[in-house]
Image: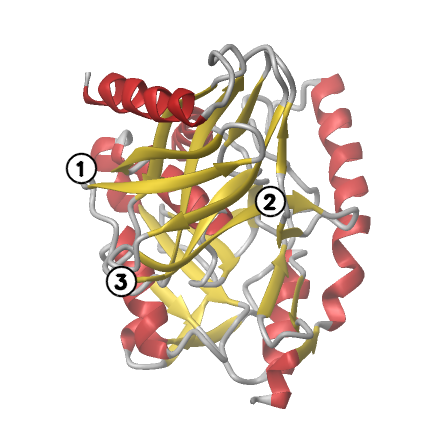
């Protein structure tokens, strides 16, 4: 069923390899010269900061109203591309982020979280909203059936995904498992690849909030 | 303490399943599963497996349908393009006198079609099928991380 979703080969398919090597180079450079703006961050900093302020998707946790991927004033927005049928990577990342936010104390109020589903076929508005809000009470559930809009969003974030159906009818999803930390101007300040520790997430958030966002 | 008891129970079952004196026994440490979001239909269980003097291989896993519709051995891997993907694996080799970890981002037991959400503090049994040691039942504890 659903021929439309069995081959969601996004146009952003080839972005990450380029992104990965660029990001690595940048990380090495900023580590070497001790750039005062980014030193102290455990995640990957891409400069100039990627602009995601043009990305706006329906927020199913707010009745489908358009949500622009930018933080509130003096806050940070965490954006994650994933899917709810993901048993290992997605819940590991989201649970670790939740632990990092719990460790922040009152500053956690300045953090918002948005998950963008790469599997809108299975992730209905209700399922996605319940899933995100099981981790974060006020979490944003971003979902669109518009393939082009999702691809544009993925490209802006340097994210990629691929949804395929196996011969025996199982849906398989591959995706970049990266958390992006966005400021109120809609700039990605830092990105965390899979495996970032809770402590590193917490330290990066505190560093950015202290620096002023 | 509960974990230690489960471990001992698992070892006892594992050893009793062995045809030899048990020196090739399998040891399972810290079997746990992550809490699942209410609507999440898939879960994952993790543990560390240690083999004795004889190498062994985990070749299958099963769980009661009151927990999940199906359990499979899976591995999350990162592709050359940086994308994370997940694949079923036929077996997980455990070399002699060595340990293999099932952990987030790597090998895991995927629990499909969860009957109920996995709630912190809950426990359920998982039957691990080893090529040499036979069936080993472990009690998995559900926790956040």
The location of residue A54, given as percent across then percent down, is: 57, 69
User: What is the number of callouts on the image?
Assistant: 3
Q: Is residue B70 visible?
A: yes
Q: Is the same chain shared between marks 3 and 1? A: yes
In the image, B144 versus A161, the foreground residue is B144
Residue at left 81%, top 41%? A21
Q: Is the same chain shared between marks 2 and 3? A: yes
> What label does residue B115 carry, if any?
3
Above or below residue B115? Residue A204 is above
> The disc numbered 2 marks a residue on which chain?
B
How far apart, in angstroms, are the residues tagged by discs 2 and 1? 25 Å
In the image, B88 versus A176, the foreground residue is B88
| Quadrant position of residue A125 | bottom left
Q: Count residues near mark 2 (Cα–Cα under 10 Å), then give few for <14, some for 14-19, many for 20+.
A: many
How far apart, in angstroms, are the residues tagged by discs 2 and 3? 23 Å
In the image, A192 versus B79, the foreground residue is B79
Query: Disc 2 marks which residue?
Result: B75
Q: Count residues near mark 3 (Cα–Cα under 10 Å), then give few for <14, some for 14-19, many for 20+.
A: some
How far apart, in angstroms, are the residues tagged by discs 3 and 1? 17 Å
The location of residue A40, given as percent across then percent down, is: 54, 21
Residue at left 54%, top 15%? B24
- Tell me the quarter of the image containing the N terminus of chain A: bottom right
The location of residue B121, given as percent across then percent down, is: 17, 37
Sequence order check: which comes first, mark 3 or mark 1? 3
Sequence order check: which comes first, mark 2 or mark 3? 2
A101 relative to A115 in the view: left or right: left
B54 relative to B22 in the view: left or right: right
Query: Could you say whether the residue bearing mark 2 is in a helix, strand or loop?
Result: strand
> The disc numbered 1 marks a residue on which chain?
B
> What label does residue B121 carry, if any?
1
> The disc numbered 3 marks a residue on which chain?
B
């Amino acid at each position: 069923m659903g021929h439309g979703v069995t081959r969601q080969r996004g146009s952003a398919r080839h972005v990450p390899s380029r992104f990965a090597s660029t990001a690595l180079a940048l990380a090495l450079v900023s580590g070497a010269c001790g750039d005062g703006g980014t030193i102290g961050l455990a995640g990957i900093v891409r400069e100039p900061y990627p602009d995601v302020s043009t990305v706006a998707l329906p927020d199913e946790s707010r009745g489908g109203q358009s949500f622009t991927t930018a933080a509130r004033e003096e806050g940070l927005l965490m954006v994650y591309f994933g899917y709810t049928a993901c048993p290992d990577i997605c819940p590991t990342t989201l649970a670790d982020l939740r632990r990092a936010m719990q460790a922040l104390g009152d500053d956690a109020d300045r953090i918002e979280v948005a998950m963008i589903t790469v599997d809108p076929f299975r992730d209905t508005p209700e399922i996605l909203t319940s899933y995100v809000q099981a981790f974060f009470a006020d979490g944003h559930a971003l979902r669109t059936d518009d393939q082009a809009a999702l691809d544009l969003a993925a490209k802006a974030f340097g994210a990629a995904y691929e949804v395929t159906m196996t011969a025996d009818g199982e849906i398989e999803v591959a995706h970049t498992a990266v958390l992006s930390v966005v400021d109120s101007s809609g700039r990605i300040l830092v990105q965390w690849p899979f495996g970032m520790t809770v402590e590193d997430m917490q330290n990066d958030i505190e560093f950015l909030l202290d620096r002023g966002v | 303490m509960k974990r230690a008891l489960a471990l001992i129970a698992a070892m006892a079952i594992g050893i009793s399943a062995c045809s030899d004196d048990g020196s090739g026994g399998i040891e399972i440490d810290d079997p746990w599963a992550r809490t699942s979001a209410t609507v999440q239909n898939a879960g994952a269980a993790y543990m560390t497996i240690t083999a004795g003097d004889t190498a062994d291989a985990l070749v299958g896993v099963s769980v009661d349908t009151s927990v999940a519709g199906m359990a499979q051995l899976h591995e999350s891997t990162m592709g050359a393009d940086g994308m994370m993907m997940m694949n079923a694996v036929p077996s997980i080799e455990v070399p002699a006198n060595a340990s293999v970890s099932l952990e987030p981002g790597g090998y895991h037991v995927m629990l499909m079609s969860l009957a109920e959400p996995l709630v912190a503090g809950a426990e359920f049994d998982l039957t691990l099928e080893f090529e040499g040691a036979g069936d080993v039942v472990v009690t998995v504890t559900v926790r956040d991380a």
